[in-house]
Image (cartoon, coloured by chain):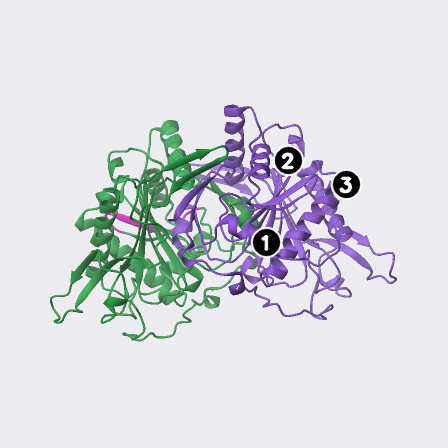
Chain colours: A purple, B green
């Protein structure tokens, strides 16, 4: 019998209905598992094509190699930025219309010079460095007084909304706070008021006790399939330590998070044939450092099903996999 | 300069950024404008294949034609139903886990025996009949005491989540209320408390005054592009008369709504090359008949862009079209 599960973090109901379940063998990413070349001449993110992108905001040089194109990571403004960095933030309120000028930031973080690598295949020190760069850009974006919300995310494959193969992440800083974020803060606050505890800290405890949905646990982080996962193999990485904002991650923790991120992405890559996916860092602002009910985390969404009228019209999802079965499969994938 | 607009109905911000704008000529649906056959032998929804579907819940016979396969509309349970009609609704509450048994209803409404028709090409009386069947099934679904929410929707084309070409709509009745619906009711209620007016009635007035986003206006309905449309050519059809629930639509109004629905879908079909789309009816329950702040409507979403990490991580959207420009284009499409 199908069941509905409530995600207490998002307050969204999910229908778990395995009637149309698909087996791991049936998944294939847009790239179809084909090997990519290490260097692609026409790729604007490959070394040697630096002038095809807007000027860098940040560059980490690779001192082990010579030449002006020797870098490990580059951060650049998005050429097709959704927002502009120039101008004042103005609000306008007329009748039933509300608008704000489109100021903010839209950055691309080129993760590696190698066209054919990605976080599943990068080594841990490089991935930890990438996470520290995320932290740096995250903090930097909030220094802009016009910015009210920052999201860091990665689109992998065409179904996940990217057409550029070269490994990259993005940061978008908006001059407003999204409703989705407000909803989640409110849910966390209500839980805190009801129980005196952080909801996510309580979920960590419950998952550690239940064990069925855990994929990896170390001293600092836990990787697991949420009880009410919105789709097959959706995964969360929670820091065990209570912390409202990603800004507070230490260098040591960034290594630990890199281990978790690489583990889950490798399991998806090797176990499910490189599926398209998005990941996002869900976090409060740096200034919410001491907030006792918010808790940052990473959410990974393999794009294995399409949202249709039902999802659009209700915000609910139909998950054709049981989270416990998905977790068991991912635990079994050797990496 | 890009701008952000707040949708007061959904409380979601949208970034209007035309840097990656695509011209109407660039759109093409999954079907790629190719003509379909009137009858497809392998199609489970084509006449003659009635035994390939579960038994009918409702059938409208076509008395103008003879034979046992002469019908105009059939309503059947979805063969891959996400929910089951059998069993009791039980709630379970353990620690941070909440679940409800997956009881409810999942129906398919086969809109016509003709494989190659769709609401853009059906004639008005047939489309009005379909809307009356929607109303009937909507009322019927709420007669089930286990049901708390009903959504009627249509998926057109592969990008909109359907693989079955034969024209059909769906109804899903869930044993819980989605957060998205709660958010919208709350927004409408707050607006009513602030101003003493129904938000959607006020939007109708503002759009009629502004005119720029209107595609079609008749005595009973108004079809327009929302001020904060989430994507290119997203369209709303509002009844002008205040009414909280679709259950209250009269037979006369169903003809008027059919005129609007056919107009907008034809304009998309002929003007944009049959793009994939979803439509959903957003409405309160039949028992909310006298509610003064909710207002039902139809929302049409052409699937012309892909949700990526930003949309997933914030719930916000980036619209590469200006609603005023989209409306001007759709007004100009001859049908």
Picture coordinates of residue B299, whole percent (x, y): 36, 50
State the predominant SS element of the stretch in magenta.
loop
In this rendering, position of residue A37 left or right of residue A182: right
Residue located beneath label 3 in the image: A252
Picture coordinates of residue B162, whole percent (x, y): 39, 62
Label 1 resides on the chain identified as A
Between B114 and A97, the one nearer to me in the picture: B114
Q: CA distance from mark 3 to mark 1?
A: 26 Å
Residue located beneath label 2 in the image: A285
Q: What span is colored magenta in the figure?
A: B218-227
Question: Which structural element holds mark 1?
Answer: helix
Task: Give the number of the disc on residue A330.
Answer: 1
The residue positioned 30% from the left and 71% from the top of the image is B116
Q: Are marks 3 and 1 on the same chain?
A: yes
Nearer the viewer's eye, disc 3 or disc 2? 3
| N-term-proximal mark, 3 vs 1 | 3
């Amino acid at each position: 019998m199908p069941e509905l599960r409530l995600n207490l973090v998002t307050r969204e109901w999910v229908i778990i209905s395995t009637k149309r379940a698909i087996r791991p063998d049936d998944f294939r990413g847009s790239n179809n598992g084909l090997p990519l070349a290490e260097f692609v001449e026409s790729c604007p993110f490959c070394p040697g094509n630096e002038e095809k992108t807007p000027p860098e905001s940040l560059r980490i040089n690779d001192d082990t190699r010579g030449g002006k194109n020797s870098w490990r990571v580059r951060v650049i403004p998005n050429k097709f930025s959704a927002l502009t960095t120039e101008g004042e933030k103005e609000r306008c309120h007329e009748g039933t219309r509300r608008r704000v000028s489109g100021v903010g930031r839209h950055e691309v973080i080129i993760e590696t010079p190698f066209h054919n690598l990605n976080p599943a295949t990068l080594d841990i020190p490089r991935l930890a460095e990438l996470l520290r760069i995320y932290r740096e850009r995250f903090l930097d974006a909030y220094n802009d007084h016009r910015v009210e919300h920052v999201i860091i995310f990665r689109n992998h494959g065409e179904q996940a909304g990217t057409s550029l193969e070269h490994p990259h992440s993005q940061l978008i800083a908006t001059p407003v706070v999204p409703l989705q974020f407000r909803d989640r803060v409110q849910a966390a606050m209500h839980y805190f008021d009801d129980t005196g505890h952080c909801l996510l800290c309580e979920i960590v405890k419950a998952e550690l006790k239940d064990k069925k949905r855990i994929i990896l646990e170390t001293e600092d982080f836990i990787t697991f399939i949420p009880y009410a996962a919105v789709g097959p193999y959706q995964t969360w990485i929670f820091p065990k330590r209570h912390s409202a904002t990603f800004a507070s991650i230490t260098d040591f923790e960034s290594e630990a998070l890199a281990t978790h991120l690489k583990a889950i992405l490798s399991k998806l890559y090797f176990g499910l044939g490189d599926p398209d996916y998005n990941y996002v860092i869900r976090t409060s602002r740096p200034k919410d450092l001491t907030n006792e009910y918010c808790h940052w985390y990473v959410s990974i969404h393999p794009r294995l099903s399409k949202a249709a009228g039902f999802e659009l019209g209700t915000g609910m999802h139909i998950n054709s996999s049981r989270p416990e079965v998905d977790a068991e499969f991912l635990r079994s994938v050797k990496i």
